[in-house]
Image (cartoon, rainbow, N blue to C red):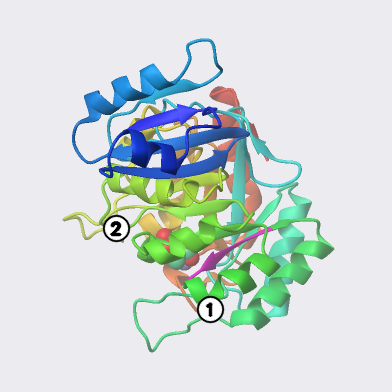
C-alpha cells in the first residue's frame, strides 16, 4: 500500500487510470491537517511505486510512504501523536490520562444526575452511559433511547461534563451524535463496517471498543475504516477478550495494550469493568491499566450497584469513586501523566 502525503494536484483517480491500469484502488482523505491519497494495489506494488516516484517531483512537498499491512492510517508511519482531541479542553497529548466514568446504562434522570454531580466534584470531565444498549439477551433492558440521551445531556450540561455514549446502529448515528461529545462504538459492533463508516462521517471523536474475538490487527483495521472517512479523532479501547478463562467475564488484554502502543499512534483507553464482570477487582485492574502509560481509563459506576439494570456485578460504587481516583492518580503520577 502506498500513502502519498500532500499529493500533487495532478494526481487524480483519472490520471492513475490512464497512466497505470485499473488494478489500483484510489482513496483520498484529509486527516490531521494533511491531504493523503491511499493507493492499494492489486499486485505489482513495486511497479506502481516506481511510477509514483517518477511522477512526483523530488522538490515537491509530496511524500510517498510505502506501508506494509492493512491499517495504514492507524499505523505508526502516519505519526499523529498528541493530536486526538476528545473535547474542547482535552487533547490526548501523551501526558494526559482521562478517567471516563458513569453507569452502564442511563436508567433515570436522578441516577445520571447523581453520577454527574460526583464526577464534577472530583474534577472529572467525561460522563459515560448507554442509552442504546446492545444486550446479549433480546429480553433484557435495552436502554432508554432518546429519553436516556436527553437525561444524560442535561446532567452533563449542568455539571460541565462531556458525554460519552454508545451507538448501536448506523440508523442511530445522527441522534447519538446530536446528544453526545464522544461516540462509543461497542465491542459487539466493532465488525459492523457500515456503522464504522457512518461514525467516521461525523465530526465527533470515536471511542472504538475492541471486539472480544478481535485480534489487534483486526482492531486496527476497524479503526482505519473510521479514519478513512476523514475522522481523525479515533481512540482505541481495550475491554477484555474471550479466552478459555471463566473465572472472570473476559480477560483484560494488557499484553495487547502494551503491544498496540508500539503499533499505532492512536490513543488507548482501557475499560477494566467489562473484562472483570466483578466490582471487587476493578481497582486492581485500573491501577495495572494506567501503569501502562495509557491515555484513558473507563469505569462503570453506579449509585446503587446491586440495583443496576445492566452489568450490576461489575458496577463500581459511586461513593467509592473518590478512593479509586486517588489510587489511580498515584500510579499516573508515577508514569508521568496527569489524571483528569
Ligand atoms: C459498555 O461500555 O457499556 C459496553 C456495552 O461495553 P462493550 O461494548 O465493551 O461490551
Ligand atoms: Mn456495560
Quadrant hosting residue 275: bottom left
Q: Residue at x 59, y 72 (%)?
A: 304
Q: Could you tell me residue 269's position as x and y percent?
A: 49, 44
Q: Nearer the viewer, residue 4 or 80?
A: 4
Q: Could you tell me residue 241's position as x and y percent?
A: 29, 53
Q: Is residue 220 above or below residue 263?
A: below
Q: Residue at x 47, y 20 (%)?
A: 63
Left or right side of 240 for 245: left
Q: Bounds of the magenta span?
A: 163-168
Question: Secondary structure under badge 1?
Answer: helix
Q: Is residue 209 above or below residue 22?
A: below
Magenta region includes residue 140: no
Q: Is residue 314 visible?
A: no
Q: Residue at x 60, y 46 (%)?
A: 99
Quadrant of the image containing the N terminus:
top left
Magenta region includes residue 164: yes
Q: Residue at x 35, y 30 (%)?
A: 2
- Which residue carries the number 2 mark? 248
- Which residue carries the number 1 mark? 307
Quadrant hosting residue 4: top left
Q: Nearer the viewer, residue 78 or 164?
A: 78
Amino acid at each position: 500500500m502506498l500513502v502519498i502525503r500532500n499529493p500533487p494536484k495532478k494526481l487524480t483517480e483519472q490520471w492513475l487510470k490512464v497512466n497505470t491500469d485499473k488494478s489500483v484502488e484510489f482513496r483520498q482523505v484529509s486527516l490531521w491537517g494533511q491531504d493523503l491519497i491511499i493507493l492499494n494495489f492489486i499486485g505489482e506494488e513495486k511497479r506502481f511505486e516506481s511510477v509514483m516516484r517518477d511522477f512526483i517531483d523530488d522538490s515537491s512537498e509530496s511524500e510517498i510512504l510505502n506501508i506494509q499491512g492493512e491499517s495504514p492510517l492507524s499505523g505508526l508511519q502516519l505519526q499523529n501523536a498528541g493530536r486526538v482531541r476528545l473535547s474542547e479542553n482535552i487533547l490526548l497529548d501523551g501526558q494526559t490520562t482521562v478517567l471516563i466514568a458513569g453507569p452502564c446504562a442511563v436508567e433515570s434522570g436522578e441516577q445520571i444526575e447523581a453520577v454527574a454531580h460526583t464526577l464534577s466534584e472530583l474534577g472529572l470531565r467525561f460522563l459515560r452511559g448507554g442509552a442504546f444498549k446492545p444486550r446479549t439477551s433480546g429480553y433484557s433492558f435495552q436502554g432508554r433511547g432518546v429519553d436516556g440521551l436527553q437525561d444524560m445531556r442535561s446532567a452533563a450540561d449542568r455539571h460541565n461534563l462531556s458525554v460519552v455514549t454508545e451507538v448501536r446502529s448506523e440508523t442511530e448515528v445522527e441522534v447519538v451524535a446530536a446528544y453526545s461529545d464522544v461516540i462509543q462504538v461497542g465491542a459487539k459492533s466493532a465488525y459492523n463496517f457500515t456503522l464504522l463508516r457512518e461514525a467516521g462521517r461525523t465530526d465527533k471523536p470515536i471511542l472504538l471498543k475492541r471486539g472480544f474475538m478481535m485480534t489487534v490487527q483486526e482492531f486496527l483495521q476497524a479503526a482505519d475504516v473510521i479514519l478513512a472517512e476523514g475522522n481523525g479523532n479515533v481512540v482505541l479501547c481495550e475491554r477484555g477478550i474471550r479466552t478459555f478463562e471463566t473465572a472472570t467475564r473476559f480477560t483484560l488484554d494488557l499484553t495487547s495494550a502494551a503491544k498496540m502502543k508500539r503499533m499505532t499512534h492512536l490513543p488507548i483507553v482501557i475499560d477494566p469493568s467489562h473484562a472483570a464482570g466483578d466490582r471487587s477487582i476493578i481497582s486492581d485492574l485500573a491501577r495495572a491499566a494506567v501503569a501502562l502509560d495509557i491515555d484513558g481509563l473507563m469505569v462503570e459506576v453506579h449509585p446503587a450497584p446491586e440495583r443496576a439494570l445492566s452489568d450490576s456485578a461489575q458496577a463500581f460504587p459511586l461513593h467509592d469513586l473518590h478512593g479509586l481516583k486517588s489510587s489511580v492518580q498515584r500510579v499516573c503520577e508515577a508514569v508521568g501523566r496527569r489524571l483528569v
